[in-house]
Image (cartoon, grey):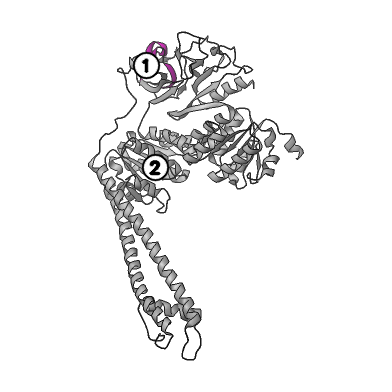
Amino acid sequence: MTSATSARTAHVIVCGLNDVGLRIVEQLQSAGERVLVIDDDADARLQRIAAGLGVQVLSEDARRGSVLTEAGIEAATALICVADRDLENLEVALLARERFPALRVVLQLSNASVGRAVSRLTGPGTVLDAAALAAPSFVEASLRRTEHQLILGGESFVVTERLVEHAADLRSAFGDLAPIAVSPADGSELIACPGRDLLVQPGDRVTLVGAANDFAERRASSDAGLLAVPSGISPLQAAQRGWQVVRGRLTDIERAFWLTLLALGGVGVLSILLLMLNYHGADKRRMGIIDATYFTVETLTTVGFGDFYFARQHTWLRMWAILLMILGATLVTILYARLTDLLITRRMAATAGRRKASGLREHVILIGLGSVGLRVLEQLRAERRDVVVLERDEHNRYLNTAREMGVPIIIGDSTLRQNLQAANLDTASAVAVLTSNDLANIETGLAVDDLLGQRSAEVPVVLRVFDRQLAATIERNFGFRHVRSTSALAAPWFVGAALGVTILNTFYVQDQAFLIGMLTVTAGGGLAGRPMSDLNERIRVIAISRASGHNAESTPDVDGARLEHPPRRDTRFASGDRAYLVGRYEELLSVLRREKGV
């Protein structure tokens, strides 16, 4: 072991320097953690960013035990595997787990079934899917949803937005409901986790959190939450189910086409070999491979120019010629029929997608069917929303899944007016632009905004953009209100799992991401015995789950502990408490540092 390696103590190893990996590195550093990255194929730009943060990057394959040793895994506090390939994450995680059973291992896996199996080894909450974690935020923005349902300690809580009708301070206007953010009506900057004495004006929007029961008596006054979701099966949905039958037939045609081609190729190869070994010409010379191939093809296609013939060959070879002509005529005919059917069916599929899209109203246009797009599509369909997919790549591996859902698909460039119009943009309720290319998403968003015209204020255009500075610039200069980052939404879950903060939910208020997490107070930590008022003023404690008997008036949670909500500012934390917190990620990290005594 090198001296540099031996000097590493209490650090976190991140395997995979991609978009999510970089955000994880940034947030780990914000939490005061030392970080080392392993990636043998990292993007040069991301490597430069990591180097600028002072993070060492090992350009090695983490699946080799010697590389993990070089990274000082024996002294690491956690290992986070977020490489682009699930198999690589699985291999590294299992190798590390086998060598160091006590090491906290967190990994990215997109296959839910495999993830459940692996979590039995690595522990609950350690196997995550970045696409699945980020998808709800894109769905909520597309549906203009400002209400989030939560289960904390076995009790139902709600995060929702309320419109201020009369000038008042937050305490007078909303009582015990905890304010998370205030969006001023004058368009000024969002106020995160404001004090209850803050004076709000009519037209301001306040995001609040509280128990569902606490909202019941106030719900009639304002409901900025859920949009209506259509119910029942429409004629269009029935037509979409019929398309599933067409899709099944298309699959059968493709399979039959390849089987026919394989059979024809097999017969042709066998014939070429037989002719090369047994056919004798007038000069008693055997055929070469070119002549044998030529004779086989003209026999299979029943052309027969007369330059070769079987009349003077062995009887068994003449019998083979009869069989070859019959098989050739049959297989070639079937192949032509299958090919014609396949081409026509695909053309019909493309036409059907455009035709079905033209009949939709109040649907969501989903542009870019990658891993994130598929998760968003699944959640929209689970809520029985009509969706049209616009995808550039006709060979996209997720298209079959979308077709099986009965979703109209349009293949084409999303920046072109005719393709957006084919997706029936004029009557769409939202557009979600979810490709993995920032520039393509921005270009598409601008094209959509231009076509929407006066409707741009009422139709949310949700953009997926990785670069935070670029996202902020787009919001300021082009007025997009729903710019989201998959990596920014998913990274806190990985960091929380590695450091001991359980992330329960992520959501946006305007352009700022908020998180709800659970932190367990330890006996030797920095929070035990401290009053809640000592916390950062930009953190809200929603509830505290205490040992049974601590407070007879609190509500028992699922573990038999007592759920105290809303907690008072003079409430003191005790060892074993589980504190449910909400705030921006930076503030949650400050609480974590306080607990760890950093």
Rendered image: mark on residue 425: none
Horizontal arrangement in the rendering, residue 415 relative to residue 108 (left or right): left
* Amino acid identity at mark 1: Asn
Q: In this view of the protein, which residue sits in the foreground, 35 or 511?
A: 35
Rendered position, 426 above or below 314: above
Where disc 2 sits, the SS reads helix
Q: Earlier in the sequence, mark 2 or mark 1?
A: 1
Rendered position, 176 above or below 41: above
Q: Residue at x 38, y 27 (%)?
A: 146
Report x, y in % for residue 446: 39, 42
Q: Residue at x 58, y 12 (%)?
A: 530
Q: In this view of the protein, which residue sits in the foreground, 31 or 451?
A: 31
Q: Quadrant of residue 33?
A: top right
Report x, y in % for residue 72: 69, 37
Q: Which residues are magenta?
A: 163-184
Q: Residue furthest right?
A: 3
Q: Nearer the viewer, mark 2 or mark 1?
A: 1
Q: Residue at x 64, y 46 (%)?
A: 61
Report x, y in % for residue 301: 36, 76
Q: Quadrant of the C terminus?
A: top right
Number of on-image labels: 2
Rendered image: mark on residue 213: 1
Rendered image: mark on residue 446: 2
The verdict on residue 178 being magenta is yes
* Label 2, residues with CA under 10 Å away: few <14, some 14-19, many ≥20: some
